Amino acid sequence: MSLAEGAAGVLAGLSYHFYGSAHLLRADDLVVRGKVSELLAAARHSVQAAEREYRREFLPEPSREKPRPDAQAVADARTLERLGAAIGALEGHVRSLPVPENDRLGQRFRAEAATLQLLLDADRELVGQAEFLRSVLESAGARWMLENGASLAGQIGAIEAAIQTRRDVLVF
C-alpha cells in the first residue's frame, strides 16, 4: 500500500471534502490537522508505553546488591524518552500549522486552485507519513525501537519535511 492510499484510507469517512469548495477549505484543514495529531499522539503513546515497560524490566528499584542502575539501560531509556518527545514536538508543530487565509490580498496574489492542489498533495503526504509511523510503532517493542532508531529518525525527518512543505505552500 502506498502512502497516498494509506492517507486516503485514513481520511475516508471523516467528512474530508478534498477541498471541493473554497468554503470547506478551513473545515478540511482542521480535519486533516486533527487526524494527523491523533496519529502522532497514538505513535507517541506507543513509545511511552514501550519506555515504561523497558524501565520496569531493566531499571528496577535500587537494592543492596545493585545500588546503581546499569548505565546502558539508563541511556536506552533516555533514548526512548527522546523519541517520544520528538513525536510530541511533531504533534505540536502540526497543531500550529498556518491556516489557509481567505482574504482578498491572498486571493489576488495567489492562484487559489493551484495552491489548493499543492495543499491537498502536502496534506496527503503528511497524513500518509503520520499513519506509517503510527502503524510501525503500534506493535513495536522497546528493543525494536532502540535497534531501529536510525530508521525512526528518518521517518520523523520525513514528517518534518512534509510539515515544512505544507507551510511553504501557504507562504506567498
Image (cartoon, rainbow, N blue to C red):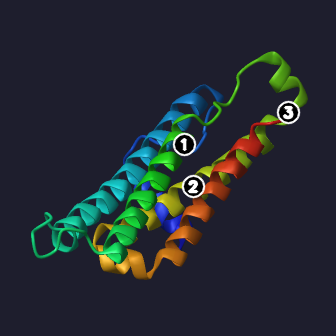
Q: Is residue 144 depicted above or below 126 in this figure? A: below
Q: Which mark is residue 103?
A: none
At horizontal 37% and vertical 48% (from top left) the residue drawn is: 13
Which quadrant of the view contains residue 4? bottom right
Query: Is 14 or 157 nearer to us in this picture?
Result: 157
Q: Label 1: state its secondary structure.
A: helix
At horizontal 36% and vertical 77% (from top left) the residue drawn is: 72
Q: Is residue 59 left or right of residue 39?
A: left
Query: Is 126 or 94 nearer to us in this picture?
Result: 94
Q: Which mark is residue 126?
A: 2
Which residue is the extreme one toward the front? 64
Which mark sits nearer the N-terminus, 2 or 3? 3
Query: Is 37 or 152 nearer to us in this picture?
Result: 152
> Answer yes or no: do the residues labelled 2 and 1 have beta carbons within 8 Å?
yes
At horizontal 39% and vertical 62% (from top left) the residue drawn is: 78
Q: Is residue 150 depicted above or below 102 in this figure? A: below
> Answer yes or no: do the residues labelled 3 and 1 have beta carbons within 8 Å?
no
Which residue is the extreme one toward the top? 104
